[in-house]
């Protein structure tokens, strides 16, 4: 039974609005993050806002040529990247701008990044994986073992498998001829 999961980084902390990874974890290059940041700045140019970057590209990606044989080292440095887990907030904005303007800026930035992204506000519930924690759903309840659903009518248990087909009493199985397995006898 999987019991992992983390709520860290899934809510807006410093700003009023955020851009959160929606589908699954992936590696995002520093160039993609920079393009998304420039897109937000370009859309909100001339306005007063504060942009917070919640991830940094701190993983070096090394590659070897496609015609190079195996062995002989790791390859040469290619680019910087960041691993972003599912439901992680990547950018936050603190501003007095209208929500729709910021939503549009995050939509444009999400188009520059790989994967699916969603717009979140301050006060939205945290997430574990792709499950939102809210009223009735806690981290502890997700870690508990699943319970069986009790039948609606407790007096008669519900069958898991459909009942077997009942054979009429006037049918007799002979087994003599493989093509004719049953013989009908008149009552």
Image (cartoon, helix red, strand yellow):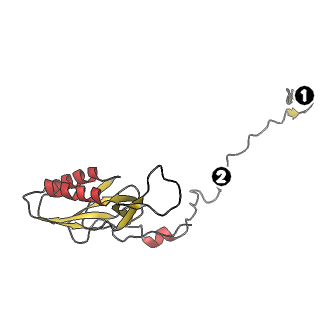
Whole-percent x and y of residue 30? 29, 60
Q: Residue furthest right?
A: 176
Taking the spot 58% from the left edge, 62% from the top edge, the residue there is: 148
Residue nearest the observer in this picture, 5 or 153: 5
Q: Residue furthest left?
A: 46
Name above or below for residue 119 compared with residue 1.
Answer: above
Q: Name the residue under label 1.
A: 177
Q: Which of marks 2 and 1 is in front?
A: 1
Query: Which SS class for mark 1?
Result: loop
- Residue count near mark 1 (Cα–Cα under 10 Å), binned few <14, some 14–19, many ≥20: few
Taking the spot 51% from the left edge, 70% from the top edge, the residue there is: 3
Residue 88 left/right relative to 36: right
Whole-percent x and y of residue 123? 26, 68
Measure the alpha-carbon separation of dots 2 and 1.
Answer: 35 Å
- Residue count near mark 2 (Cα–Cα under 10 Å), binned few <14, some 14–19, many ≥20: few
The answer to whether one can see residue 152 in this image is: yes
Taking the spot 64% from the left edge, 53% from the top edge, the residue there is: 158
Residue nearest the observer in this picture, 101 or 144: 101
Residue 122 left/right relative to 61: left
Name above or below for residue 8 compared with residue 109.
Answer: below
Q: Name the residue under label 2.
A: 160
Q: Quadrant of residue 170?
A: top right
Name above or below for residue 103 compared with residue 57.
Answer: above
The answer to whether one can see residue 130 in this image is: no
Whole-percent x and y of residue 107? 24, 52
Q: Quadrant of the C terminus?
A: top right
Residue nearest the observer in this picture, 146 or 87: 87
Mark nearer the N terminus (2 vs 1): 2
Whole-percent x and y of residue 2? 53, 67
Residue nearest the observer in this picture, 44 or 67: 67
Taking the spot 90% from the left edge, 28% from the top edge, the residue there is: 177
Q: In which quarter of the image is residue 157?
A: bottom right
């Amino acid at each position: 039974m999987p019991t992992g999961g983390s709520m860290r980084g899934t809510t807006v902390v410093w700003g009023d609005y955020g851009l959160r990874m929606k589908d699954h974890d992936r590696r995002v290059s520093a160039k993609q993050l920079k393009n998304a940041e420039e897109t937000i700045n370009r859309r909100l140019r001339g306005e007063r806002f504060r942009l917070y970057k919640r991830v940094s590209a701190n993983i070096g990606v090394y590659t070897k040529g496609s015609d190079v044989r195996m062995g002989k080292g790791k390859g040469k440095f290619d680019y910087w990247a960041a691993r972003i887990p599912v439901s992680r907030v990547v950018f936050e904005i603190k501003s007095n701008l209208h929500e729709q303007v910021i939503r549009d800026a995050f939509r444009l930035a999400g188009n520059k990044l790989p994967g699916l992204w969603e717009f979140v506000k301050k006060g939205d519930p945290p997430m574990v994986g792709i499950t939102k924690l809210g009223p009735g759903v806690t981290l502890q309840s997700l870690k508990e073992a699943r319970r069986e659903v009790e039948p609606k009518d407790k007096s008669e248990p519900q069958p898991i498998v459909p009942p077997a087909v009942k054979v009429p009493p006037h049918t007799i199985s002979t087994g003599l001829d493989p093509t004719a397995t049953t013989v009908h006898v008149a009552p």
